[in-house]
Image: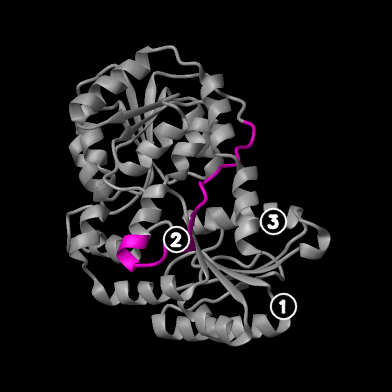
Amino acid sequence: MTKKDNLKVLLITPIYPPEIGGPATYTKEIVPLLEKRGHHVRIIALNGKKADNNVIIIHEKNFILRIAKLFVEIIRQIKSFKPNVILSLDPLSSSLPAIVPAKIFGVKIVLRFVGDIAWEKARREKKIEYNLTEFLHRKTNKHILLLQSIVVRGYDRVYTCSKFMKEYLTKMYHIPNNKVKVIYNFSIIPPIKNRSRRKQIITVCRLIPLKRVDRIIAVKKGIPDINYLIVGSGPEEENLKALSGKDKRIVFLGRKNQSEVLELIARSKALVLYSQHEGLPKVVLESLYLGTPVILSNIPPHKEIYDRMKGIGVYLCRNEQELLEKIKLVTRKKEDYKKISEKAKEVFSWKKHLEDLEKLLS
Protein backbone atom coordinates (compact mmCIF):
# COMPACT_ATOMS: atom_id res chain seq x y z
CA MET A 1 0.00 0.00 0.00
CA THR A 2 1.54 3.32 -1.05
CA LYS A 3 1.52 6.56 0.91
CA LYS A 4 -1.29 8.01 -1.18
CA ASP A 5 -3.35 4.94 -0.28
CA ASN A 6 -3.05 5.57 3.46
CA LEU A 7 -6.42 5.43 5.14
CA LYS A 8 -8.31 7.51 7.64
CA VAL A 9 -10.10 5.02 9.87
CA LEU A 10 -12.86 5.96 12.32
CA LEU A 11 -12.85 3.05 14.77
CA ILE A 12 -15.90 2.61 17.03
CA THR A 13 -15.60 0.28 20.01
CA PRO A 14 -17.96 -0.54 22.91
CA ILE A 15 -15.05 -0.53 25.39
CA TYR A 16 -11.58 0.97 25.53
CA PRO A 17 -8.61 0.44 27.89
CA PRO A 18 -8.30 0.29 30.84
CA GLU A 19 -11.60 -1.62 30.50
CA ILE A 20 -11.01 -5.35 30.04
CA GLY A 21 -12.54 -7.28 27.15
CA GLY A 22 -12.03 -8.37 23.55
CA PRO A 23 -12.80 -5.05 21.76
CA ALA A 24 -10.55 -3.09 24.17
CA THR A 25 -7.66 -5.52 23.69
CA TYR A 26 -8.12 -5.59 19.92
CA THR A 27 -8.17 -1.77 19.77
CA LYS A 28 -4.99 -1.56 21.86
CA GLU A 29 -3.20 -3.96 19.51
CA ILE A 30 -4.53 -3.11 16.04
CA VAL A 31 -4.40 0.71 16.22
CA PRO A 32 -0.58 0.96 16.65
CA LEU A 33 -0.13 -1.55 13.81
CA LEU A 34 -2.33 0.50 11.49
CA GLU A 35 -0.58 3.73 12.49
CA LYS A 36 2.86 2.21 11.85
CA ARG A 37 1.66 1.49 8.31
CA GLY A 38 0.90 5.20 7.86
CA HIS A 39 -2.86 5.07 8.44
CA HIS A 40 -4.63 7.62 10.64
CA VAL A 41 -7.01 6.27 13.26
CA ARG A 42 -9.54 8.13 15.38
CA ILE A 43 -11.41 6.22 18.10
CA ILE A 44 -14.91 6.62 19.51
CA ALA A 45 -15.51 4.45 22.59
CA LEU A 46 -18.60 3.91 24.71
CA ASN A 47 -16.61 3.14 27.84
CA GLY A 48 -13.02 3.60 28.94
CA LYS A 49 -10.52 6.36 29.67
CA LYS A 50 -9.50 9.13 27.28
CA ALA A 51 -5.89 8.57 26.20
CA ASP A 52 -5.26 11.45 23.74
CA ASN A 53 -6.99 13.76 21.28
CA ASN A 54 -7.65 10.88 18.88
CA VAL A 55 -9.90 9.15 21.43
CA ILE A 56 -13.47 10.30 22.13
CA ILE A 57 -15.26 8.64 25.07
CA ILE A 58 -19.06 8.72 25.27
CA HIS A 59 -20.22 8.01 28.83
CA GLU A 60 -23.96 7.31 28.84
CA LYS A 61 -25.72 4.42 30.62
CA ASN A 62 -29.10 4.87 28.94
CA PHE A 63 -29.08 2.81 25.73
CA ILE A 64 -31.25 5.19 23.67
CA LEU A 65 -29.30 8.28 24.73
CA ARG A 66 -26.00 6.47 24.12
CA ILE A 67 -27.08 5.57 20.59
CA ALA A 68 -28.22 9.16 19.95
CA LYS A 69 -24.97 10.69 21.24
CA LEU A 70 -22.92 8.25 19.19
CA PHE A 71 -24.97 9.05 16.08
CA VAL A 72 -24.26 12.79 16.50
CA GLU A 73 -20.56 12.17 17.20
CA ILE A 74 -20.19 10.00 14.09
CA ILE A 75 -21.62 12.77 11.92
CA ARG A 76 -19.29 15.28 13.59
CA GLN A 77 -16.26 13.07 12.91
CA ILE A 78 -17.27 12.38 9.30
CA LYS A 79 -17.37 16.14 8.71
CA SER A 80 -14.15 17.00 10.58
CA PHE A 81 -11.92 13.89 10.37
CA LYS A 82 -13.23 12.85 6.92
CA PRO A 83 -12.61 9.08 7.28
CA ASN A 84 -12.34 6.75 4.29
CA VAL A 85 -13.86 3.95 6.34
CA ILE A 86 -15.70 3.31 9.61
CA LEU A 87 -14.69 0.16 11.51
CA SER A 88 -17.11 -1.05 14.21
CA LEU A 89 -16.07 -3.66 16.77
CA ASP A 90 -19.39 -5.02 17.95
CA PRO A 91 -22.61 -5.92 16.15
CA LEU A 92 -25.00 -3.62 18.01
CA SER A 93 -24.29 -0.60 20.24
CA SER A 94 -21.20 0.70 18.44
CA SER A 95 -22.31 -0.25 14.94
CA LEU A 96 -26.04 0.53 14.58
CA PRO A 97 -25.70 4.36 14.70
CA ALA A 98 -23.06 4.36 11.93
CA ILE A 99 -25.25 2.98 9.14
CA VAL A 100 -27.31 6.05 8.21
CA PRO A 101 -24.47 8.64 8.41
CA ALA A 102 -22.20 6.35 6.39
CA LYS A 103 -24.81 5.93 3.67
CA ILE A 104 -25.59 9.66 3.55
CA PHE A 105 -21.93 10.75 3.32
CA GLY A 106 -20.75 7.80 1.21
CA VAL A 107 -18.30 6.35 3.77
CA LYS A 108 -17.46 2.64 3.64
CA ILE A 109 -18.47 0.70 6.79
CA VAL A 110 -16.83 -2.52 7.99
CA LEU A 111 -17.96 -4.67 10.91
CA ARG A 112 -15.91 -7.04 13.07
CA PHE A 113 -18.29 -9.80 14.23
CA VAL A 114 -16.83 -12.34 16.68
CA GLY A 115 -19.85 -13.16 18.87
CA ASP A 116 -23.65 -13.05 18.75
CA ILE A 117 -24.99 -10.66 21.40
CA ALA A 118 -28.53 -12.10 21.22
CA TRP A 119 -27.27 -15.59 22.07
CA GLU A 120 -24.86 -14.35 24.74
CA LYS A 121 -27.62 -12.31 26.43
CA ALA A 122 -30.04 -15.25 26.39
CA ARG A 123 -27.38 -17.48 27.96
CA ARG A 124 -26.47 -14.87 30.57
CA GLU A 125 -30.13 -14.46 31.55
CA LYS A 126 -30.50 -18.29 31.63
CA LYS A 127 -33.29 -18.21 29.06
CA ILE A 128 -31.55 -20.96 27.11
CA GLU A 129 -29.08 -23.79 27.74
CA TYR A 130 -28.20 -24.70 24.15
CA ASN A 131 -25.15 -23.69 22.13
CA LEU A 132 -24.78 -21.27 19.23
CA THR A 133 -25.41 -23.94 16.59
CA GLU A 134 -28.81 -24.80 18.12
CA PHE A 135 -29.56 -21.08 18.57
CA LEU A 136 -29.28 -20.76 14.80
CA HIS A 137 -32.43 -22.86 14.49
CA ARG A 138 -34.39 -21.84 17.61
CA LYS A 139 -33.71 -18.07 17.66
CA THR A 140 -34.35 -16.38 21.02
CA ASN A 141 -34.18 -12.62 21.84
CA LYS A 142 -35.70 -11.80 18.46
CA HIS A 143 -35.64 -8.02 19.02
CA ILE A 144 -31.84 -8.08 19.38
CA LEU A 145 -31.58 -10.44 16.41
CA LEU A 146 -33.58 -7.95 14.35
CA LEU A 147 -31.23 -5.08 15.26
CA GLN A 148 -28.16 -7.22 14.56
CA SER A 149 -29.67 -8.26 11.25
CA ILE A 150 -30.07 -4.59 10.28
CA VAL A 151 -26.40 -4.02 11.16
CA VAL A 152 -24.97 -7.09 9.44
CA ARG A 153 -26.96 -6.47 6.26
CA GLY A 154 -26.35 -2.71 6.34
CA TYR A 155 -22.57 -2.87 6.51
CA ASP A 156 -20.49 -3.07 3.34
CA ARG A 157 -18.19 -5.83 4.59
CA VAL A 158 -18.00 -8.06 7.67
CA TYR A 159 -15.03 -9.96 9.01
CA THR A 160 -14.93 -12.64 11.65
CA CYS A 161 -12.39 -14.84 13.42
CA SER A 162 -13.21 -18.37 12.23
CA LYS A 163 -14.81 -20.38 9.45
CA PHE A 164 -17.42 -21.54 11.95
CA MET A 165 -18.48 -17.95 12.69
CA LYS A 166 -18.59 -17.14 8.97
CA GLU A 167 -20.91 -20.09 8.34
CA TYR A 168 -23.08 -19.03 11.28
CA LEU A 169 -23.31 -15.44 10.01
CA THR A 170 -24.30 -16.37 6.47
CA LYS A 171 -26.97 -18.82 7.65
CA MET A 172 -28.41 -16.77 10.53
CA TYR A 173 -28.55 -13.43 8.73
CA HIS A 174 -28.88 -14.65 5.12
CA ILE A 175 -26.03 -12.56 3.77
CA PRO A 176 -23.88 -13.45 0.74
CA ASN A 177 -20.89 -15.64 1.40
CA ASN A 178 -18.55 -13.17 -0.34
CA LYS A 179 -19.58 -10.35 2.00
CA VAL A 180 -17.97 -12.09 4.99
CA LYS A 181 -14.22 -12.65 5.29
CA VAL A 182 -12.37 -14.79 7.80
CA ILE A 183 -9.41 -12.93 9.31
CA TYR A 184 -7.87 -15.05 12.03
CA ASN A 185 -7.02 -13.51 15.38
CA PHE A 186 -3.44 -12.80 16.33
CA SER A 187 -1.53 -11.96 19.47
CA ILE A 188 1.39 -9.74 20.40
CA ILE A 189 3.45 -11.14 23.26
CA PRO A 190 6.04 -9.09 25.17
CA PRO A 191 9.20 -10.87 26.35
CA ILE A 192 8.55 -13.19 29.31
CA LYS A 193 11.59 -13.77 31.54
CA ASN A 194 10.38 -16.53 33.87
CA ARG A 195 9.34 -19.56 31.81
CA SER A 196 10.27 -22.35 34.23
CA ARG A 197 7.42 -24.86 33.89
CA ARG A 198 5.60 -25.98 37.02
CA LYS A 199 3.31 -28.96 37.40
CA GLN A 200 0.20 -26.85 37.01
CA ILE A 201 -2.59 -26.18 34.56
CA ILE A 202 -4.38 -22.88 34.09
CA THR A 203 -7.73 -21.58 32.87
CA VAL A 204 -8.20 -17.92 31.95
CA CYS A 205 -11.80 -16.86 31.30
CA ARG A 206 -14.86 -15.09 32.59
CA LEU A 207 -16.48 -17.35 35.18
CA ILE A 208 -19.83 -18.03 33.51
CA PRO A 209 -21.67 -21.34 32.91
CA LEU A 210 -20.77 -21.78 29.24
CA LYS A 211 -17.04 -21.88 30.13
CA ARG A 212 -17.73 -25.12 32.09
CA VAL A 213 -14.98 -24.53 34.65
CA ASP A 214 -17.00 -26.75 37.01
CA ARG A 215 -16.25 -29.74 34.75
CA ILE A 216 -12.51 -28.99 34.86
CA ILE A 217 -12.62 -28.76 38.67
CA ALA A 218 -14.39 -32.12 38.86
CA VAL A 219 -11.78 -33.70 36.58
CA LYS A 220 -8.86 -32.09 38.42
CA LYS A 221 -9.94 -33.83 41.63
CA GLY A 222 -8.92 -37.07 39.93
CA ILE A 223 -5.36 -35.73 39.53
CA PRO A 224 -4.35 -34.72 43.07
CA ASP A 225 -0.66 -34.06 42.30
CA ILE A 226 -1.13 -30.97 40.08
CA ASN A 227 -2.12 -27.37 40.78
CA TYR A 228 -5.03 -25.78 38.96
CA LEU A 229 -4.97 -21.97 38.59
CA ILE A 230 -8.20 -20.18 37.70
CA VAL A 231 -7.80 -16.61 36.46
CA GLY A 232 -10.91 -14.46 36.03
CA SER A 233 -14.08 -13.45 37.79
CA GLY A 234 -17.79 -13.65 37.11
CA PRO A 235 -21.19 -14.70 38.45
CA GLU A 236 -20.17 -18.36 38.90
CA GLU A 237 -17.14 -17.60 41.07
CA GLU A 238 -18.69 -18.42 44.46
CA ASN A 239 -20.32 -21.60 43.15
CA LEU A 240 -16.99 -22.76 41.72
CA LYS A 241 -15.18 -22.01 44.97
CA ALA A 242 -17.77 -24.07 46.85
CA LEU A 243 -17.33 -26.90 44.34
CA SER A 244 -13.55 -26.90 44.79
CA GLY A 245 -14.05 -27.44 48.54
CA LYS A 246 -10.89 -27.70 50.61
CA ASP A 247 -8.61 -28.61 47.72
CA LYS A 248 -5.68 -26.25 48.25
CA ARG A 249 -4.29 -27.11 44.82
CA ILE A 250 -7.23 -25.33 43.17
CA VAL A 251 -6.37 -21.63 43.34
CA PHE A 252 -8.68 -18.74 42.37
CA LEU A 253 -6.54 -15.75 41.38
CA GLY A 254 -9.28 -13.32 40.33
CA ARG A 255 -8.66 -10.83 37.55
CA LYS A 256 -5.07 -10.22 36.46
CA ASN A 257 -3.56 -7.81 33.97
CA GLN A 258 -2.22 -9.16 30.68
CA SER A 259 1.44 -9.30 31.70
CA GLU A 260 0.55 -11.26 34.86
CA VAL A 261 -1.64 -13.66 32.87
CA LEU A 262 1.10 -14.28 30.31
CA GLU A 263 3.66 -15.04 33.02
CA LEU A 264 1.29 -17.53 34.66
CA ILE A 265 0.61 -19.25 31.31
CA ALA A 266 4.34 -19.37 30.52
CA ARG A 267 4.99 -21.19 33.80
CA SER A 268 2.18 -23.72 33.30
CA LYS A 269 2.22 -27.13 31.63
CA ALA A 270 -1.06 -26.41 29.81
CA LEU A 271 -3.92 -23.99 29.33
CA VAL A 272 -7.29 -25.73 29.66
CA LEU A 273 -10.43 -24.30 28.05
CA TYR A 274 -13.45 -26.60 28.09
CA SER A 275 -16.02 -24.07 26.85
CA GLN A 276 -19.37 -24.92 25.30
CA HIS A 277 -18.84 -22.10 22.78
CA GLU A 278 -16.03 -19.81 21.62
CA GLY A 279 -15.29 -17.57 18.64
CA LEU A 280 -11.56 -18.11 18.30
CA PRO A 281 -10.25 -17.44 21.82
CA LYS A 282 -7.34 -15.04 22.03
CA VAL A 283 -6.03 -16.59 25.24
CA VAL A 284 -5.49 -19.85 23.34
CA LEU A 285 -3.35 -18.06 20.75
CA GLU A 286 -1.40 -16.31 23.52
CA SER A 287 -0.74 -19.67 25.15
CA LEU A 288 0.46 -21.21 21.88
CA TYR A 289 2.65 -18.15 21.17
CA LEU A 290 4.30 -18.84 24.54
CA GLY A 291 4.77 -22.50 23.61
CA THR A 292 2.29 -23.65 26.25
CA PRO A 293 0.11 -26.57 25.06
CA VAL A 294 -3.67 -26.11 25.07
CA ILE A 295 -6.29 -28.67 26.08
CA LEU A 296 -9.61 -27.69 24.49
CA SER A 297 -13.21 -28.81 24.17
CA ASN A 298 -13.97 -30.40 20.81
CA ILE A 299 -16.04 -27.55 19.33
CA PRO A 300 -15.74 -26.17 15.75
CA PRO A 301 -13.51 -23.13 16.45
CA HIS A 302 -11.14 -25.25 18.53
CA LYS A 303 -11.02 -27.80 15.71
CA GLU A 304 -9.93 -24.98 13.39
CA ILE A 305 -7.05 -24.16 15.75
CA TYR A 306 -6.11 -27.86 15.84
CA ASP A 307 -6.17 -28.08 12.03
CA ARG A 308 -4.16 -24.90 11.47
CA MET A 309 -1.57 -25.99 14.06
CA LYS A 310 -1.47 -29.50 12.48
CA GLY A 311 -2.12 -30.82 15.98
CA ILE A 312 1.13 -29.35 17.35
CA GLY A 313 0.55 -28.47 21.01
CA VAL A 314 -3.26 -28.75 20.70
CA TYR A 315 -5.31 -31.48 22.40
CA LEU A 316 -9.07 -31.84 21.83
CA CYS A 317 -11.48 -33.48 24.30
CA ARG A 318 -14.98 -34.78 23.51
CA ASN A 319 -15.87 -35.58 27.12
CA GLU A 320 -14.59 -35.43 30.70
CA GLN A 321 -12.84 -38.81 30.46
CA GLU A 322 -10.75 -37.53 27.54
CA LEU A 323 -10.16 -34.29 29.43
CA LEU A 324 -8.78 -36.28 32.37
CA GLU A 325 -6.54 -38.35 30.11
CA LYS A 326 -5.19 -35.32 28.20
CA ILE A 327 -4.40 -33.39 31.39
CA LYS A 328 -2.52 -36.41 32.77
CA LEU A 329 -0.65 -36.83 29.47
CA VAL A 330 0.38 -33.21 29.01
CA THR A 331 1.44 -32.60 32.64
CA ARG A 332 3.70 -35.68 32.53
CA LYS A 333 4.99 -35.29 28.98
CA LYS A 334 8.03 -33.34 27.78
CA GLU A 335 6.77 -30.94 25.11
CA ASP A 336 8.75 -29.10 22.43
CA TYR A 337 7.69 -25.63 23.59
CA LYS A 338 9.79 -23.84 20.95
CA LYS A 339 8.18 -25.81 18.12
CA ILE A 340 4.68 -24.96 19.41
CA SER A 341 5.54 -21.26 19.61
CA GLU A 342 7.08 -21.11 16.14
CA LYS A 343 4.10 -22.85 14.55
CA ALA A 344 1.58 -20.54 16.27
CA LYS A 345 3.42 -17.41 15.14
CA GLU A 346 3.44 -18.76 11.59
CA VAL A 347 -0.27 -19.65 11.27
CA PHE A 348 -1.73 -16.87 13.46
CA SER A 349 0.49 -14.03 12.24
CA TRP A 350 -0.24 -10.38 13.07
CA LYS A 351 1.32 -9.46 9.71
CA LYS A 352 -1.22 -11.61 7.83
CA HIS A 353 -4.09 -10.20 9.93
CA LEU A 354 -2.98 -6.63 9.19
CA GLU A 355 -2.51 -7.32 5.49
CA ASP A 356 -6.00 -8.84 5.17
CA LEU A 357 -7.56 -6.05 7.21
CA GLU A 358 -5.95 -3.33 5.07
CA LYS A 359 -7.37 -4.92 1.95
CA LEU A 360 -10.82 -5.10 3.53
CA LEU A 361 -10.77 -1.48 4.71
CA SER A 362 -9.49 -0.08 1.39
Q: Is residue 1 left or right of residue 111?
A: right
Tags 2 and 3 touching, CB below 8 Å: no
- Color encoding of the figure: one colour
Is 147 in front, or is 168? Answer: 168
Where residue 227 appears, as percent x and y from the top left, is 34, 24
Residue range highlighted in magenta = 170-191
In the shown orientation, is residue 267 left or right of residue 104? left
Name which of mark 3 and mark 1 comes first in the sequence.
Answer: 3
Q: Quadrant of residue 136?
A: bottom left
Quickly name the residue at label 2.
113
The three-letter code of the residue at mark 3 reads Leu
Q: Amino acid at mark 2?
A: Phe
Name the residue tied to disc 1: 81
Q: Is residue 89 left or right of residue 124?
A: right
What's the distance in space between the residues labelled 3 and 1, CA to CA?
17 Å
Q: Nearer the viewer, residue 311 or 43?
A: 311
Along the viewing direction, whichever of 135 and 360 lies nearer the viewer: 360
Residue position marked by numbered label 3 in the rendering? 34
